[in-house]
Image (spheres, helix red, strand yellow):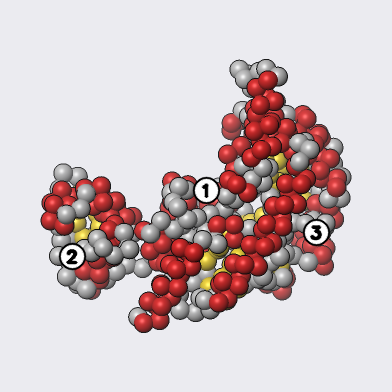
Amino acid sequence: MLILRPEQPTPLVSQIVEGLRGLIGAQKLKADSKLPSIRAFAAAHGVSVFTVVEAYDRLVAQGLLVSRANAGFFVKRRSEDSASGTTSVPRPDPRFDARWYLQQIFENRNLPLKPGCGWLPHDWLFEDGMRRSLRHLASEGTDIGGYGLPFGHMALRMATAEALSEQQIVVEAAQVLLTQGSSQALDLVARRLLKPGDSVLVDDPGYPNLMFMLRFLGVEIIGVPRTPTGYDMPALEALLAVHRPKAFFTQPRLQSPTCSMASLPQLVQLLQLAQTHDFTLVENDIYAEMDASMRPSLASLGQLRRVVYVGSYSKTISPNIRVGYVVAQPELLEELAQLKMVSGLTSSDITERLAFGTVTDGRWRKHLKALRDRLAQAQGSVARRLDGLGFELFHEAAAGMYLWARHPDIADSAELSRRAAAEGIMLGPGQLFLVNPHPTGWLRFNVAFSEDERLWRFLERNIEEHRHD
């Protein structure tokens, strides 16, 4: 049925997956055909049963095979097959975004190459500062047996308020609520501001986890197109003329996935539109520490009038500590704290103390400057490599983690991502980030993980294959 070539650099798992995909696409394996058992396939082709298990599992995840209890693996019958009498390789499932992002991104976080992930390499983080903070916590006999405070560790809240004042966001510690990462902050704000059936604006493309969470709340998600210079303001005004959104969840600065920046005139106009159309701006500014420029934010311009501000320490200290925060007017913050207690009691006092020790370390500011410089260098280097392969760059940022790019010969980056995963490479396919997912050539590249030559050899080889298809 298949000829496997162990001497080739392509992993055996990938050879099995692509070989069976080809047989199904050519109708040599028809709908409802039974495949050899795992052990029979392994014996026939001289491979381990673990290799076959992984290959079959991937084909099930791709919608090509189905596992039937006590019967084995069969070629899946598509709904369109029964009407047409034919079988074809299926188009990517529109639900691929949720499954792939929430499961593969984290379950396969140990893949050798991760240019599609949303965090920094461990050696780019402030590991020395975090270790010093850990040693200090251990030496001072911190109580590890109780709960934290409802609003979070007071010393970190004070340090957060002080840091925000340097960005012209004037708040007191009482206006800072610590959360289990920025994701919990966004979830609390959404549950407080929205109810099922409400309309809400989000960036498009934008943050997948936010979109999944909003959909679970039963709200109508409306995408506001991003441009290389921020927002498509005419499109936004047209949407506001039709819809009555309760909120706009947005990343004006170093936005994921595009890394675009909204201009000062756009921020001012956004505040005016929020006032006129009576909606709240939820500013997700988790990449602020990666920006060397002292640029205004919605929160600094509006001083929390119609603005809720969300930040995080996880991006620059470690994603493992899960410490974020939300800043808002006192009345709203009190309600958010109550929601936090109802849904998960307090956040972790230990991790909040750890974050406090890290950001008050004498070398913290030096670390941030070095991180910004390193990201700027990687931005330029990866942009040049993408350009050299013929990619179109959405926006060339001088800061931040991401580049958003597409190649004219790649129509479906999800399919490319499946191939990459089979070779140990985690890519960020564009449809993950779209409000209405559909096949697209766009990819998000994390520049901190994109300087490995194995990535470029993979991209070059696959672009060449697409040209000859």
Quarter of the figure with residue 189: top right
From mark 1 to mark 3, how far is it between C-alphas?
36 Å
The one nearer the camera, 37 or 389, is: 389
**Secondary structure type for disc 1:** helix
Report which quarter residue 381 is drawn in: bottom right
Number of numbered labels in the structure image: 3
Q: Which mark is residue 362?
A: none
Q: Is residue 220 visible?
A: no
- Classify the position of the N terminus by image quarter: bottom left
Residue holding disc 2:
2
* Disc 2 from disc 3: Cα separation: 57 Å
Compare marks 1 and 2 and give the one earlier in the sequence: 2
Disc 3, SS: loop
Circle 1: residue type: Phe
In the rendered image, the residue lying farthest to the front is 7
Q: Earlier in the sequence, mark 1 or mark 3?
A: 1
Query: Residue 314: x, y in percent?
Result: 64, 43
Q: Earlier in the sequence, mark 2 or mark 3?
A: 2
Of all residues shown, which one is farthest toward the bottom?
A: 468
Badge 2: how crowded within 10 Å, few (<14), some, or many (20+)?
A: few
- Residue 166 image point, x, y percent: 85, 47
* Disc on res. 293: 3
Q: Is residue 447 rendered to the left or right of residue 18?
A: right
Which amino acid lies under the numbered mark 3 shown in the image of this protein?
A: Ser
Q: For mark 1, what is the residue?
A: 216
Numbered disc in front, either 1 or 3: 3
Tag 2: amino acid: Leu
